[in-house]
Image: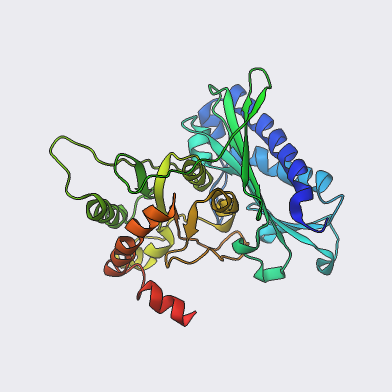
Amino acid sequence: MADASWMLDPIRQIHAQIRARVVAACESSRPEDMARIAADGEGDTIYSIDRISEEMLVELFERQIAASCPITLIAEGLPGGKLILPRGTAEDQIRWCVIADPIDGTRSLMYQKRSGWILTGVAPNRGAHTCLADIELAVQTELPLVKQHLCDTLWAVQGNGSFGERLNRLNGETMPLAACPSRAMGLAHGFSSVSRFFCGARDVLAAIDDEIQTAALGVGSDGKAWSFEDQYLSSGGQLYELIMGHDRFLADFRPLLGPILKHRGLAAGLCCHPYDLCTELIAREAGVMITDEFGLGLRSRLNTDANVAWIGYANEHIRAVVEPILHEALIRYGLINGSRSEFVSKN
């Protein structure tokens, strides 16, 4: 148990059990039942479908992981956002932090619009300083639509590349699934997006997106579409799209909109949290380039309330094209102060 790789098979089994239960619940329930609000506290709204996976998460990790090695489980819905397993274990005995999102993409899944994902990342326990960069093992498993018979699982152990498997739910057969990020040199004739899922400052996000596209592609021609977008309401799902070569560039700047929303008299909206990005290791191991708004690696601490801005580039060529345009736009719209080089020199 010197490294996290021993948890790979147990975590994959846990994901498979949660997937089976969630799919069964969706098959036997109406969308409005799954979409019923179960709790609406300070964090994200908890829907009925979330309760199914949250209850299983603690039970399965306690039995199948913590019985072999004490862990701190970090997930939304837990008291204080975390739980030590086995219960009663002293904090100085904890070797591993496990951060999980039992359903990422709840809103799309509960209305049977698009797949959700189970996300889990494992990092050595560094106490309150444990961050996304510390994660050594990551697994994400697709929660398919009821009408969908194929579903995927991706995983990575730090330094060993990324791997995947596709399950046929009709006959139980599996086949290997290879990561294949886009090798395109630019954005033309491909999908890329700046996330603007919720109301508030969509005009700002759309303007930044338009500036990136125009600067990277030119003004275009009448009657032609040179690039496309896809607002996949799941951070894990967005990572999957980059990993599998479906998207070339993605960015989520929601945490940077606070001052603009406040100026407009609007409340700060729902943002991406560390548990939403706890599998970004898989993307990086596949060759995708994941950064924060300044072009640096993600280092958000593993908790349930930090807001995380992130950018994903399918390859270094696309990053070279997009990143300078993007940073200039972020500065001009007041979402960040100063250039990347200025930020790096200060940190």
Q: Position of residue 280 (x, y in %)?
A: 56, 53
Image quadrant assignment for residue 166:
top right
Could you tell me if residue 139 is visible in this image? no
Image quadrant assignment for residue 95:
bottom right
User: Is residue 105 or residue 339 the one in the foreground?
Assistant: 339
User: Is residue 180 or residue 238 the one in the foreground?
Assistant: 180
Residue farthest toward the left in the current orientation of the protein = 222
Q: Position of residue 216 (x, y in %)?
A: 26, 53
Could you tell me if residue 176 is visible in this image? yes
Left/right of residue 33 with respect to residue 338 in the rendered view: right
Left/right of residue 167 with respect to residue 347 in the rendered view: right
**Scheme by which the image is coloured:** rainbow
Left/right of residue 42 with respect to residue 230 in the rendered view: right
Left/right of residue 215 with respect to residue 64 in the rendered view: left
Residue farthest toward the bottom in the current orientation of the protein = 346
Image quadrant assignment for residue 201:
bottom left
Residue farthest toward the top in the current orientation of the protein = 171
**Residue at image point 54% right, 28% down:** 145
Q: Position of residue 32 (x, y in %)?
A: 51, 30
**Residue at image point 46% right, 54% down:** 270
**Residue at image point 42% right, 45% down:** 183
**Residue at image point 62% right, 49% down:** 161
Q: Position of residue 336 (x, y in %)?
A: 36, 70
User: Is residue 309 or residue 55 the one in the foreground?
Assistant: 309
Which part of the image, by quadrant, shows the N terminus? bottom right
Query: How many numbered discs sit on the rendered protein?
Result: 0
